[in-house]
Image (spheres, rainbow, N blue to C red):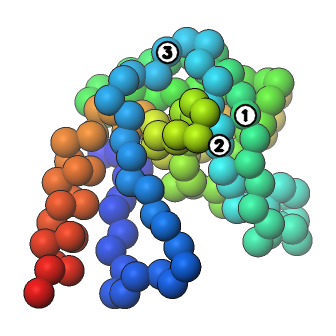
Amino acid sequence: MADLAVVRLERSLRNTVIETRLSNDEVLLNDELSMVGYGATSANGNDTGIRRFGENIVTELRLADNRKGREIRFRFPGAHTHAGDSGGPCFKEKGDSRWLVGINGGFVSQGPAESWFTSTSSYRDWIEKQIDEARKLESP
């Protein structure tokens, strides 16, 4: 089981362009990726609702516990996820282009900072199928 979902909205968001670019390439060690978070950054959770983003370097790639996909891991230093960020995106960027490469799967707050993401490359076919099915529902 992976922590992935595709959400279909009842109507389009006004003044919003949504990119659904998935990377054709696997993430590699030492790739610089951007993560986005919206969860609390403190233990008491008083600072929720603030979007955060930053870069980090991939320090580990490993087989997920379900043995069906891969995990992308970041370790200190750099940007990290926090409590409540689960499901947030991880992107690979080059110039003006951005590709979704991971979905936030968790963080470790004790010891050195660590964040991990489910790699979307292992689930690309499933994600694209869900997007195509949602688009069919939009067509009159």
The residue where tag 3 is placed is 28
Q: What's the residue at 37%, 87% (across, down)? A: 11
Q: Position of residue 133 (x, y in %)?
A: 15, 66
Q: Residues within 10 Å of mark 3 (few under 14, many from 20)?
A: few
- Mark 1 burial class by Cα count in 10 Å: few <14, some 14-19, many 20+: some
* Residue position for label 2: 35
Question: How far is mark 3 from mark 2, CA to CA?
Answer: 16 Å
**Apparent side of residue 22 relative to residue 41 in the rendered image (left or right):** left
The amino acid pointed to by label 3 is Leu
> Residue at position x 40%, y 82% from top?
12
Q: Looking at the image, which is closer to me, 133 or 44?
A: 133
Q: Are marks 2 and 1 in contact (CB under 8 Å)?
A: yes
Point out the image quarter for the C terminus.
bottom left
First reached walking from the N terminus: tag 1 or tag 3: 3
Q: Which residue is mark 1?
A: 55
Identified at 20% across, 80% down, the residue is 138
Provide residue 33's location: percent of width, then percent of height: 62, 31
Q: Picture coordinates of residue 22 (x, y %)?
A: 37, 41
Q: Which secondary structure, mark 2?
A: strand
Whether residue 76 is visible: yes
- Taking 112 as reference, is 125 left or right? left
Quadrant in which the N terminus appears = top left
Q: Are the residues tagged 1 and 3 within 8 Å (C-beta)?
A: no
Q: Amino acid at mark 2?
A: Met
